[in-house]
Image (cartoon, rainbow, N blue to C red):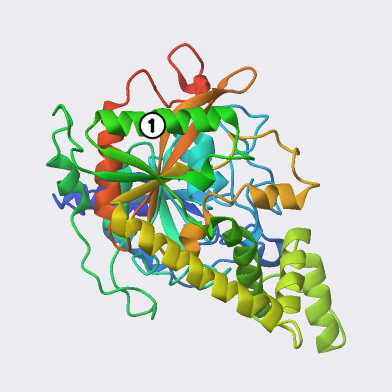
Amino acid sequence: MDAENVDRAVERGEDLGPLMGVLIGVKDNICTVDMPSTGGSRILEGYRPAFDATAVKRLRENGAIIVGKTNMDEFGMGSSTEGSAFQVTTNPWDVSRVPGGSSGGSAAAVSARQCVVSLGSDTGGSVRQPAAFCGVVGMKPTYGRVSRYGLMAYASSLDVIGCFGSSVTDTAILLKTISGHDRFDSTSSKHDVPNYVADLASLDCLESKPLTGLRVGVIQETLGEGVDRGVISAVNAAASHLECLGSVVTEVSLPSFDLGLPAYYILASSEASSNLSRYDGVRYGSQVAADELGSLYGDSRAKGFGGEVKMRILMGTYALSAGYYDAYYKRAQQVRTLVQKSFKDALEKNDILISPAAPSVAYKIGEKTNDPLAMYAGDIMTVNVNLAGLPALVVPCGFVEGGSTSLPVGLQIIGPAFTEEKLLRVGHVFEQTLQNHTFVPPVLSEDAPLI
């Protein structure tokens, strides 16, 4: 239908916008009126929403063609896309490895050139970590920059809709299209949306020092114990490259950085325990026949939800229960305040902060499925940004040898709230001036057959 509408517009000589005819993938937890939207869960198997999410509606209005829904960890709860109720998504760089998660399907689709750009969602790093694993650009906007209307809620105070592209410019075009206030979302911001694309077009990347005077802070806590040496080496090389472009690079310390991970999982699980109560088998989704309402609820959820979702609902319910609220949820909120202050202080002295997007490159499928704590630890680089509500951009910055092939490393660039244009500008200059790196999976190279 989208393609037919574009064809008719072309015949009439109309220009629908910068995404006219562009093929776009949409993560399966973002509602689309004419396609199943399952959130990667059996409890919503076959569900077709009666409306488009605001982000999807804006894409269609600008001539985009939604080619399909992308796989994900169930309800966004996972870091590898192994947690989907339907199938495991593989990484185009090495099909024995994960693409990251929970937006792994969206990242892999762009990396494999199955679509030009795609939408994902980011609650604790679900756009940025898969972007790093798949060697593509990933943008997590400021909380409120993009409407959440039509996004299946996981943790409402943390969720954002984000963008994937094979270049910073493509990502900027997508972000510009979906950003802006929405009356259907009370948390969406009324901040003006800059023309990101025009801003990038005005840059002269051929200048000898195009980033002269930019103050860059390297987060100390992200380059220590637990981070692969190859990742550290690639990020240090990226910092040196920023210096060559004229930036002033210094190290900064975020004292509360390590506290963010446990606080995030308490807060996210607590919000999930409330948000997922709507999936009861009564109004929509799969239903298990039962004689009593309590049994209908329990049996439908037992059959429909996967193990990870059940575990996080239980964790969140426990953290919110009488006698434990102060010890867990309230304390996690206090840590969130510390994280926000820590970033505020660091960004008063620096224009941007940088870190790895993940402590390792893409790992083998099945490697961490039986060790949830190890899986959770993979989010340590990204969750603090969500707790603070800040924007962050991930761009590929190098490679680490991963057996039969080299695997991409992602550089995370963090800025103050509503400074996406600054992050895109830095990312674009970095991307255009990075030498001797081509971030195209080997299977798509000129010497290999297309998949």
Q: Residue at x 83, y 74 (%)?
A: 299
- Which element type, helix, strand or loop, lies under badge 1? helix
Q: State which quadrant residue 279 falls in.
A: bottom right
Is residue 201 visible in this depiction of the protein?
Answer: yes
> With 40 as the anchor, is 298 left or right in this view?
right
The answer to whether residue 214 is above or below residue 419 is: above
Residue under the image location 51 percent in, 58 percent down = 255
Q: Residues within 10 Å of mark 1 (few under 14, many from 20)?
A: many
Tell me: 298 left or right of 129.
Answer: right
User: How many numbered circles are shown?
Assistant: 1
The residue carrying mark 1 is: 238
Residue 191 place in picture, x, y as percent: 24, 70
Q: Residue at x 47, y 55 (%)?
A: 254
Viewer-proximal residue among 294 and 270: 270
Residue 24 in view of the camera: no
Q: Position of residue 312 (x, y in %)?
A: 72, 66
Percent coordinates x, y for residue 178 in the rendering: 32, 60
Q: Is residue 101 left or right of residue 323?
A: left
In the rendered image, residue 62, in percent from the top left (x then y), is placed at: 26, 56
Tell me the amino acid under the disc marked 1: Ala
| Relative vertical location of residue 215 with respect to residue 419 in this rendering, above or below | above
Q: Residue at point 30% right, 55% down?
A: 349
- Outermost top residue: 447
